[in-house]
Amino acid sequence: MKKLKIITHPLVQHYLSIMRDKKTSKAEFKESLDKISYIVAAETFAALSLGNKSVNTPFKKIVGKKVNETVVLLPILRAGLGLTKGFTDLYPEILTSHIGIYRDEKTLKPVQYYFRFPKIQNKKDATVIILDPMIATGGSVIFTIECLLNMGIRKIKVVSLLCAPEGIDAIEKSFRSNEKKHIEITSCSLDEKLNEKGYIIPGLGDAGDRIFGT
Ligand code: PRP
Ligand code: URA
């Protein structure tokens, strides 16, 4: 798998600081996340593969371009839903799958409660983009990647807002030997560490609670 890529775009860092502030309102938190999601989506989509298509302009016929791969968005419920806007607005043809996972508060292990995936052909050529704003222990992402690999998916991108070194190390260790699988992780910040309760430090608190106001 490839190493972690950090998005250093100034507007991402600007809106991320708004999100980290504990005084930021629920509305401003979600607005900032929506704005970041467009930039992160554009970066992620930059690697889409194109095919040719014939286009008749008002003056002549040309060879235009169109995306020629199947792309599936897979937000990890709940908080992953908060990152979807930029992806579905920029490329509405994207298929959206959902996986429901929560962390057991005591063990911090992922517990799955839902999974729906579209029926697609050529699974090994499709790209799946996992959305999870917070990679803490990495357990939720590792569980999701394992589900996808078991289904025959080979091209996997993980997109997050914040990650902890502990989570990135755990993901890299889990999939180190998967040379034939293409797994990439993109985030907007590699934070310092996890605290004793598994929260990212300095972080932004509980992403799901701040997005949905619970
Ligand atoms: C949070 C977050 C991630 C997960 C990260 O989900 O949204 O999915 O924790 O932690 P991990 O890397 O240690 O697995 P949470 O369990 O709070 O559920 P929620 O999204 O429904 O709030
Ligand atoms: N999940 C969150 O929402 N925040 C953290 O800091 C860690 C896991």
Image (cartoon, grey):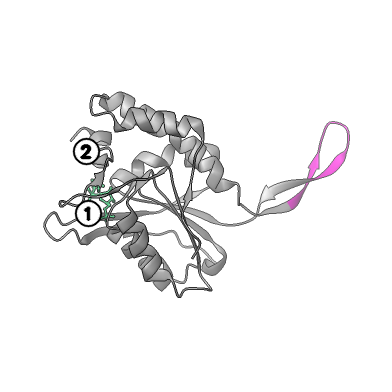
Foreground: 28 or 172?
172
Residue bearing the label numbered 2 = 209
Q: Quadrant of the C terminus?
A: top left
Crowding at label 2, few (<14), some or many (≥20) Cα neighbours within 10 Å?
few
Determine the CA span between mark 2 and mark 1: 12 Å
Quarter holding residue 69: bottom right
Q: How many marks?
A: 2
Q: Looking at this rendering, what residue extends furthest in the right direction?
A: 60
Q: Residue at x 26, y 44 (%)?
A: 201
Foreground: 107 or 14?
14
Q: Position of residue 106 (x, y in %)?
A: 11, 57
**Label 2 sits on what residue type?**
Asp
Find numbered disc 1 in the image and state the secondary structure of the residue it sits on. Answer: strand
Foreground: 193 or 118?
193
Q: Residue at x 49, y 42 (%)?
A: 7
Some atom of ligand 1 lies within 8 Å of the CB belonging to the residue at label 2: yes
Q: Position of residue 131 (x, y in %)?
A: 39, 49
- First to last magenta residue range: 52-63
Q: Is residue 114 above or below residue 152?
A: above
Q: Main secondary structure of the magenta part?
A: strand
Q: Earlier in the sequence, mark 2 or mark 1?
A: 1
With 205 as the anchor, is 168 left or right in this view? Answer: right
With 186 as the anchor, is 45 left or right in this view? Answer: right
**Disc on res. 28:** none
Some atom of ligand 1 lies within 8 Å of the CB belonging to the residue at label 1: yes
Residue bearing the label numbered 1 = 102
Q: Magenta segment: does it hold 71?
A: no
Foreground: 162 or 101?
162
Q: Position of residue 138 (x, y in %)?
A: 31, 58
Q: Magenta segment: does it hold 53?
A: yes
Q: Looking at this rendering, what residue extends furthest in the front direction?
A: 192
**Label 1 sits on what residue type?**
Tyr
